[in-house]
Image: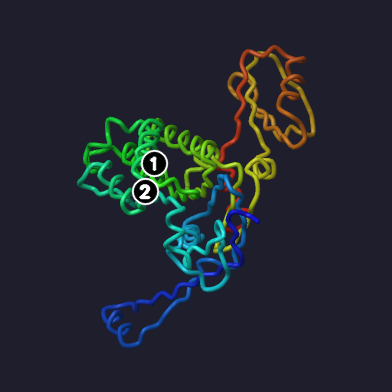
Amino acid sequence: MSFIEVKHINKTFKVPLKGEGKFGALKSFFNRKYQYIKAIDDISFSIKKGEIVGYIGPNGAGKSTTIKILSGILVPDSGNVTIDKMTPWKDRKKYVAEIGVVFGQRSQLWWDIPAIDTFNLLKDIYKLDEQEYRKTLKELIELLNLKDIINIPVRQLSLGNRMKCEIAASLIHKPKILFLDEPTIGLDAVSKKVVREFIKKINKQSNVTVILTTHDMADIEALAKRIILIGKGKVLYDGSLAKLKKEYDYLRKVRVITKDKIDIEKDYIVSAKKIDDGIEFTIDIRKTEINEFIKLISSQISIIDLDIDSGNIDELIVKLYEDFKI
């Protein structure tokens, strides 16, 4: 049995409609009309223990609703969720002790006090053993380099340092599952790297299962081998990132800087465009490997320089959205 099992969950929200015009709000008060929005439409998937899964989709796709159901905040209209043999909304008290949640735009840290005070409060909330808590806290301080910042009021911390403290707070009770919603939003390149490396480390060391929702595709590429794409409340793709790249990201641009003339015709060459100091080829990597193409042109011309465009994960996701019309 999978560690996380989601079976045919549905969730519809009843949203009141507001009337237009000067007296629209008054009319709506006496004659209320509603719109029904299906946030989740028969979603099913399973996740193994220790997996890092990217749960992605455009705004309004149903990502946050799914995460709220998985974390026990919302109850689905129908369907079932079993996580580590528990139902999140039924076994909530026991279940929340097993999960950690980080929302990039919401804080669980007390704003006017140092992060260490929040950590100590969480120790009491989760009823952690003092010795075990101190050991975990020491590990988190070392891994996330928090020594110089945990005694500073949270409101005085940079966004990057605050996010590192948020992640530490979510892991202080050693959860088995970590839900990350936009964990690197607004962070600089250095802070992003620190956060990503830490997530990989705790996943490897403690076998923590990670579900990552983000619009930053660099996070997905750095952390997740598997992605679940949803749109309009439905699962549209569930599989490896490598397979997705093979299916949708199969064109590579190879810029060859040379003074020689190039006259090559192969079925895998989609186009050959003259540039100032050479030629830019577009290669279909489903039909050949890039190194085979380079061997071919190297045997025919003298290459001054060569540049390969390795593809762009953001463009890949845009192609996916277009293909699924979301």
Q: What is the secondary structure assignment of the residue under circle 1?
A: helix
The residue labelled by disc 1 is: 132
Do the residues under discs 2 and 1 have CB atoms within 8 angstroms? yes
| Residue for point 40% across, 47% down | 173
Nearer the observer, 218 or 259: 218
User: Which mark is drawn over residue 128?
Assistant: 2
Residue 19 lies, in percent from the top left, at: 34, 79
User: From mark 2 to mark 1, how far is it between C-alphas?
Assistant: 7 Å
Nearer the observer, 252 or 105: 105
Classify 10 Å Cα crowding around label 2: few (below 14), some (14-19), many (20 and above): some
| Residue for point 65% across, 29% down | 273
Amino acid type, callout 1? Glu
Task: Give the quadrant of residue 263.
Answer: top right
Count of marks, rendered view: 2
Residue 212 as seen in the image, left or right of residue 241:
left
Nearer the observer, 37 or 106: 106
Nearer the observer, 79 or 10: 79
Residue 177 lies, in percent from the top left, at: 50, 50
Amino acid type, callout 2? Leu
User: Which mark is drawn over residue 254?
Assistant: none
Location of the C terminus by quadrant is bottom right
Q: Residue furthest bottom?
A: 30
Classify 10 Å Cα crowding around label 1: few (below 14), some (14-19), many (20 and above): few
Residue 31 lies, in percent from the top left, at: 35, 87
Location of the N terminus by quadrant is bottom right
Above-or-below relation of 147 to 244: above
| Residue for point 74% across, 24% down | 293
Q: What is the secondary structure assignment of the residue under circle 2?
A: loop
Above-or-below relation of 116 to 280: below
Residue 33 lies, in percent from the top left, at: 40, 82
